[in-house]
Every structure is written in C-alpha cells, then in structure tokens.
Amino acid sequence: MLLTHPQVKAFLDYLRFEKRYSQHTLISYSTDLKQFSDYLQEQYNNADPENITAFIVRSWLAQLKEQKNNSKTINRKISTLKSLFRFLMRAGVVQQTPMTTITSPKISKRLPSFVDEKGTKQLFSEGGKKGKQHVIKKNEWERKTDKLILSLLYQTGMRLSELITLKEKHIDVYYGQIKVLGKGNKERIIPISNELLKELQSYMDEKSVRLENVDELLINKKGKPLYGRYVYSRVNNMLKEVNEITIEKKSPHVLRHTFATHLMNNGAELNAVKELLGHSSLAATQVYTHNTIEKLKDIHKKAHPKA
C-alpha cells in the first residue's frame, strides 16, 4: 500500500520532526494519505508512487466530489498530495509529479461570524445573561478561569490551540505583552491592555498559592492544564448565555473573528491586524475588510440625505 511505502513514512516524519507541524495537522495529512492509499488499493490494486498519474488523482477527486466532500476538504487533500510528490521528487522516488495539471476547485468565500460590540459588552458583564444560574455550576476558580479565557480570546485574537499552550513565562508583565506560539511554531508578540494585565497578574498570583511549578498559564480546579475540548465547551456555553448574541456559530474562533472585525471597524490598518492574527499573507486577513465596508454602507445609508 502507498501508506506503507518507506518514503511516505519518511514524508510524515519530515512533517513531524523537521517542519514541526501540529498534531492536528499531522492527523489531517495522515488521514488524507490513508484515504488515497485505500482508493489505490481498491481501484488499482496498490499503485506504486511512480505509477500514479494525473488521471488516477483526478478519478479519486471525482469520487470525493460524488461523496459530497466540499471544495475546502478536496483542496486540502490536493495540497497533501502536492506536498507528498514534491518530497518524493527530492528523494528521487519519482521523476515528475502528477499534480502539475491538477487544479483546485474554487471555494466560495464565507464571511466570518462575529459578535457585535453590544453583544461583547454583555458578554463581559453580569447583565444580559439568560437566567441567574450559569449553564455549568462553577466554583470561584472556574469563574475566574472562564473570565480569563474570554478576555484572552477577545483581546488578543489568539487561536484555541495557542491559548491552551500559553505558559506563564510568555506573559511579559514589564512591557505589557504576550508571546504567542502560532502555526508552524512562528512566534508573534501581542500587546495587551493594563486591565487584562492586572487580570493575568491576579490569576497567576492566586495560582501560585494553590499550586507550585505549573508552567501552563490556564489550569482547571484540579490543577491540570486545560485541553481544547473543555475550552470549546466553556466558550460555547458562555456565548449561549448572552441574550444579545444571536449568531449561530458559537466557538472560540468566533472571538478571534470578533477581535479582528472590531479592530478593522475602528480604523486599524490591515497589515497590523495581519500581524496580530499571525496570518502568513494578507489574503487571509482581507476577509475582515468586507464587514468594515458593510458598516460604512450602513452609516452612509442612515446619515446621507440622498442615500
């Protein structure tokens, strides 16, 4: 099978140890290659890498389309195969890549969901909650941790994966900034407000009384580092508790979108937002300009006599 080929295994090791991709990304690559390998086994009785043609790749992509896979998923699988065959060419396994003539399907741009400023104010206040009781009964430490999760996600725009890997040493109290380790282990510096800095300092001080020698910034009531599924669930529940937040999608990434949208709506430069988000190119950041334009249209419509 393709997946058991020594150079394919070497490719996955290359991604893990040299490119240092995240576990999530490695799982995606492995899943894509397993699916392609299974297809080759079923349809072509285990084609070797040097015998894989553009026709074979297209037939697999056509099958994926028939199985109702969306364009984004198919593009990811194309990207996986392109990376694999580039690696195989460097290793001398194949003379040329079959991916040269493979084109990626167009992806319809979907505007990011975000919380408006009124909803954000309610999120950080006690008013506007649906009922007096929280969705999950919490002690004071859990409340403090939940509040800090929301503050960090909204005020820095960091990703969920970046949040749960934050260490205390990443908080620069003197300069009022946080060092974030993003995709591809790229570091970026995000400035933080005095209010958030005080919140962080208070949290770390209380944590040092409860526990010693815990590097991770955020911990649960048992003193264990937070994990992604827990944070996702907590943020989802906290967003559901606010009357003003009516968007369908309620996740940590929504707060990242909210961070970027609010910056753009209040005059931040696109390049600055790109750096704060840790995007590798402006193309990924430009999606937030649409919301800014929509806001300007709304202001124009309400304020201009001839609108």
Image (cartoon, helix red, strand yellow):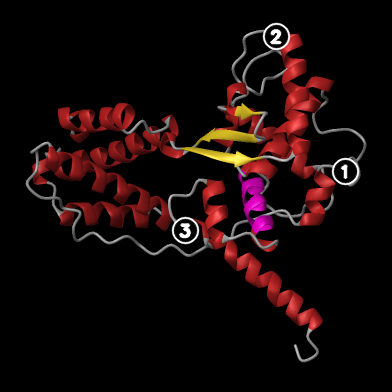
Question: Which sits in the foreground, 210 or 115?
Answer: 210
Label 1 environment density (alpha carbons within 10 Å; few <14, some 14–19, many ≥20): few
Magenta residues span 253-263
Q: Residue furthest front?
A: 174
- Contact, mark 1 vs mark 2 (Cβ under 8 Å): no
Front-most of residues 262 and 114: 262
Pair 3/1: label in front: 3
Residue furthest to the bottom in view is 306
**What predominant SS class does the magenta segment belong to?**
helix
Which mark sits nearer the N-terminus, 1 or 2? Answer: 1
Is residue 110 visible from the viewing direction of this image?
A: no
**Mark 3 vs mark 1, CA separation in Å:** 39 Å
Q: Reading the chain from its start, which is encountered first: label 3 or label 1? A: 1
Residue at mark 1: 130
Residue kind at label 1, given as amino acid type: Lys
Q: Which mark is residue 282?
A: 3
Going by the numbered disc 3, the residue's amino acid type is Leu
| Residue 258 part of the magenta-drawn span | yes
Q: What residue do we see at 40% from left, 50% from top? A: 73
Mark 1, secondary structure of its residue: loop
User: The residue under label 2 is which amino acid type?
Assistant: Leu
Q: Mark 2 falls on what kind of element?
A: loop
**Can you tell which quarter of the image residue 93 is in?**
top left
